Image (cartoon, coloured by chain):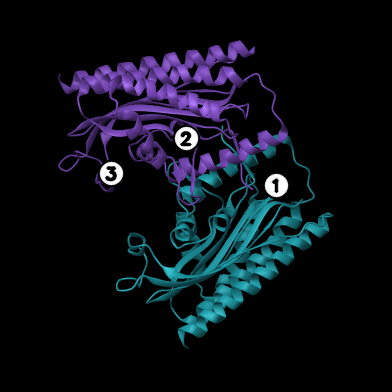
Chain colours: A cyan, B purple
Amino acid sequence: MEIKIKQQLAKYWFSILQDIICLEVENLEKEYGSNIKFIKNKWKHGEFRTIKGKVIEKGGVAFSNVIGKFPKEFAKKIPGTKNNTNFWSSGISVVLHPRNPKVPAMHFNTRFISTQKSWFGGGIDITPCLVDNKEKKNFHNEIKKMCNLHNKKYYIKYKKNCDEYFYLAHRKELRGIGGIFFDYKMDNWKKDFSFIKDVGNTFTYLIKEIAKKKMFKKWTKKEKEIQLLKRGRYTEFNLMYDRGTKFGLNSGGNPEAILMSMPPVAKWK
Amino acid sequence: MEIKIKQQLAKYWFSILQDIICLEVENLEKEYGSNIKFIKNKWKHGEFRTIKGKVIEKGGVAFSNVIGKFPKEFAKKIPGTKNNTNFWSSGISVVLHPRNPKVPAMHFNTRFISTQKSWFGGGIDITPCLVDNKEKKNFHNEIKKMCNLHNKKYYIKYKKNCDEYFYLAHRKELRGIGGIFFDYKMDNWKKDFSFIKDVGNTFTYLIKEIAKKKMFKKWTKKEKEIQLLKRGRYTEFNLMYDRGTKFGLNSGGNPEAILMSMPPVAKWK
């Protein structure tokens, strides 16, 4: 298949998935009794949608399609840029910060990037601020089931990546309870794309599953405080380590769109 | 003068200055009618003191004296480490986040570092969240006066450094209203040390001057909101750009002490 067609298909999927995820989040809001919808912010390379709801205190769902040249220094770390720093990229990125501290923060993204090479990347991970082993088990089971449909080796490998990636070295802490994370995926385009779509669908399903179980539960002031401190750590990770943030800011991304991942409020002791 | 003696003198000064600054902040609290004091946190390479007061919502005054080896990659950016990555460092670092949004956040640090070379670095800068041109003018005048006592060229040079340094490239915004910033200062040890002491004394004076003028003033909810958003930017700067943070985390510093610069609460739109 020609690269241009692959790009079109990937881009089209990311754009549809943006609609689906926004719809599901808006449905959660409706079920909770709020009528709050996403606000759409268009910019020259995409559209990021943000919501400040009753269930999702702050959420962002960004679709982008950026074509450009990497800065030279940055290009050194990117495959297929030796003779040519041009790139094409498209992706979807989601961060949901729920109001209720019992509901974990949820994060997902998938992307397709072409230089002289081309690959998919992405992942799903959640960050609870209160311990819930049952939720953790269910979450990992759902992801494992989906991975196993594609390749029995994916789950273990991508779970390990995720734990290594979402790690705050300076704090010696994991960001959350993991999930899956993969990058530079260029095995077989059709199979990879089919996996990418399932990652998106599974995340959409998990949003509902996870939020519905707890969004109506009461929380204490202390639990909210724990959430705000946990969000401080989330902020540290995103600004200090996150490759997506660095990639975005280095590839002419929109800072408002990239930093929509920031929590609404965060605290430090 | 032998390097060991220089190190002792610098270290001794930073440690005294920590006492002086804490005392001045506690005096401000007293004047406001609060009896809140700093809490002292000792760790193996120093002591950081934190306060959660009525005037200063969150403040940190850290003294450190770290001896060690730089990680190889990091050492490449540091003078005098070509054949030997050992270093000696001592410094004081202060960040004050006032409760009243009319009072700017205040930041200062000075340090003495030895590798095969040795130098001073540091600076003063403030970050108001509301425009006050008179305050800005007074602040810069005080700093300029002090600089001129040492060298007529310092103010212009170090002010420029400061504006370049405290810049959020991804936002295309200055962090605050500047001040002075200098690094790798190794002209003449005695003169440099005398300048370093005056930078510390001037900051101590400025804390009082700036806070006293406004700490009793009422503020609106909207002004507080502006402050919290401005603190979001402050967080972005510290985690994404600040060399002190990077230096600290790369030289075996205490993450709790280094990240005491984080605001108590920050918001993102």
Neighbours of disc 3 within 10 Å: few (<14), some (14-19), many (20+): few
Q: Which mark is residue B32?
A: none
Q: Residues within 10 Å of mark 1 (few under 14, many from 20)?
A: many
Residue furthest toward the right?
A33
- Residue position for label 2: B259
Within the image, what quadrant is residue A95 found in? Answer: bottom right
Describe the element under mark 1 as helix, strand or loop: loop
Which residue position holds label 1?
A102
* For the residues bearing labels 2 and 1, Cβ distance under 8 angstroms: no
The correct choice, above or below, for B127 with respect to A33 in the image is: above
Residue lying at 63% horizontally and 14% vertically, measured from the top left: B32
**Residue A190 on image: x %, y %:** 51, 83
CA–CA distance in space, label 1 to label 3: 40 Å
Where does label 3 land, which residue? B71
- When the figure is inspected, residue A134 is found, relative to residue A269, above or below; the finding is below
Residue B47 appears anywhere in the view = no
Helix, strand or loop at label 2? It is: helix
Residue type marked 2? Leu
Q: Give the Cα distance between marks 2 and 3.
A: 20 Å
Q: Amino acid at mark 3?
A: Pro
Residue at coordinates 48% horizontally, 13% vertically from top-left?
B23
Q: Chain of mark 1?
A: A
Q: Disc 1 residue type?
A: Lys
Among the two numbered marks 2 and 3 on one chain, the one whose residue lies closer to the N terminus: 3
* Image quadrant where one finds the C terminus of chain A: top right
